[in-house]
Image: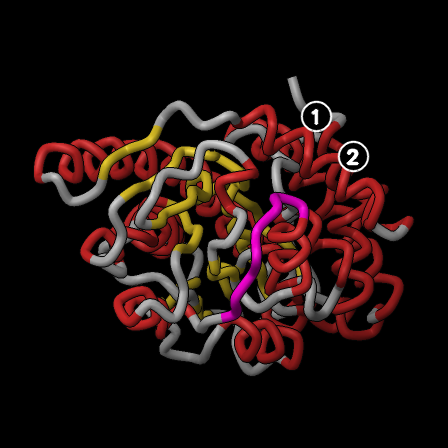
Amino acid sequence: MMARRNKRRSAALAVTVLAFPMTLAACGSDSEGGGGEAGGDVTLQLAHSYTETQPQHRCGAQVIADEVADAGVGLTVEIFPASQLGGDADRIASVVSGDIDMDIQGASALGAVYEPVAVLDAAYAFDDSDHLARFFDGDASDELLDGFESETGVHTLGAWSAGMREFTANEPIRSPDDLDGLRMRFPNSPQFLMNAKALGADATEVAYEELFLALQQGTVDGQENPITNIAASSLQDVQDYISMSDHQANSNLVIVGADAWKGLSEEQQGALEDAVDAAEEQVPQCVAEDEEKTLTEWQDNGDMEVVDDVDVEAFRTQADTYLRDNFNADQLKVYEAVRGEAQ
């Protein structure tokens, strides 16, 4: 993703030069061709909602912080995990306003400030983590991310998949018909609720923090999440089956606010992008390793039965038809750009 990022950074710098010529002239640049001094040593806050044991932190946020420190460019990234700086909706608003510098966010949460980006979380939009990587590595994502930045000022540094989302319940879910009559918890966002309808589920909105209790008390019958999230919340203690539907690539976008990004020298921007590149390489592998270990433990311990004969094609076909019939023109354009990168 390096070349593509440099292209985007050059375009963003050109816009900044046009918008702030006097500021950059005052900063100056060195003889090696680097960016102007944008304020010397800088510390950026990096927030996210994951625990420190999850791969999004260990192999994502921590790698970014470590790589930036090793670059020795006067830049420090300080991590605030586990929603310490607020929930997803609060944090994206804070990044836009400049109160938080950086965040790791799902596409659906970002849809609250720029609706088209939420389509990245559409059911079966991505076939797998490699498909998601291809979309962000190439030109197909440029229009979406440029529109996001133009609308909000927020710059996207990179993205990765944090695993495929799967169904859990106290009975197997092998086809769309098996969802009939089940109260399935989905996150309270427009794209997730659209996904529920596309998949044939009766969506019940429950906060993630209240999900374990809701399943334990029978307020909901089942839910859907990536394996790493299911394990982090110990949902195997209150669910009997995990059905491998692979119905959504759980997206993470690494974003930085406008003021924080512009406050970095070109050298610091490059170091931060390189650090995100390193994290992008590591997160999917860390997720895959954690998932394999977790599924083996659940099977060996009898915690949950793994249902691996799900009729994925039936779910995929139903979802694709529903989404194409119900997306607006802007959403459909993003969806088709994503599907165009499928192999």
| Vertical position of residue 258 compared to residue 332: above or below | below
Q: Residue at x 50, y 52 (%)?
A: 272
Magenta highlight on residue 65: no
Amino acid type of the residue that numbered disc 1 sits on in the rendered structure: Glu
Image quadrant holding the N terminus, namely top right
Spatial separation of the CA atoms under disc 1 and disc 2 = 7 Å
Numbered label attached to residue 337: 2
Q: Is 11 displayed left or right of 74 in the figure?
A: right
**Camera-nearest residue between 111 and 315:** 315
**Camera-nearest residue between 178 and 77:** 178
| Vertical position of residue 343 compared to residue 97: above or below | above
Q: Residue at x 66, y 52 (%)?
A: 197
Q: Position of residue 245 (x, y in %)?
A: 47, 34
Numbered label attached to residue 341: 1
Q: Residue at x 38, y 40 (%)?
A: 283
Label 2 residue SS: helix
Magenta highlight on residue 204: yes
Q: Within 10 angstroms of label 2, few (less than 14), some, or many (20 or more) residues?
A: some
Which quadrant holds residue 133? Answer: top right
Q: Residue at x 64, y 63 (%)?
A: 110
**Residue 70 visible (yes or no):** no
Q: How is the image coloured?
A: secondary structure
Circles 1 and 2: CB atoms closer than 8 Å:
yes
Point out the residue furthest to the left here. 301
Q: Which residues are magenta?
A: 198-205
Q: Position of residue 177 (x, y in %)?
A: 55, 39
Q: Position of residue 31 (x, y in %)?
A: 64, 49
Amino acid type of the residue that numbered disc 2 sits on in the rendered structure: Ala
**Residue 194 visible (yes or no):** yes
Q: Within 10 angstroms of label 1, few (less than 14), some, or many (20 or more) residues?
A: some
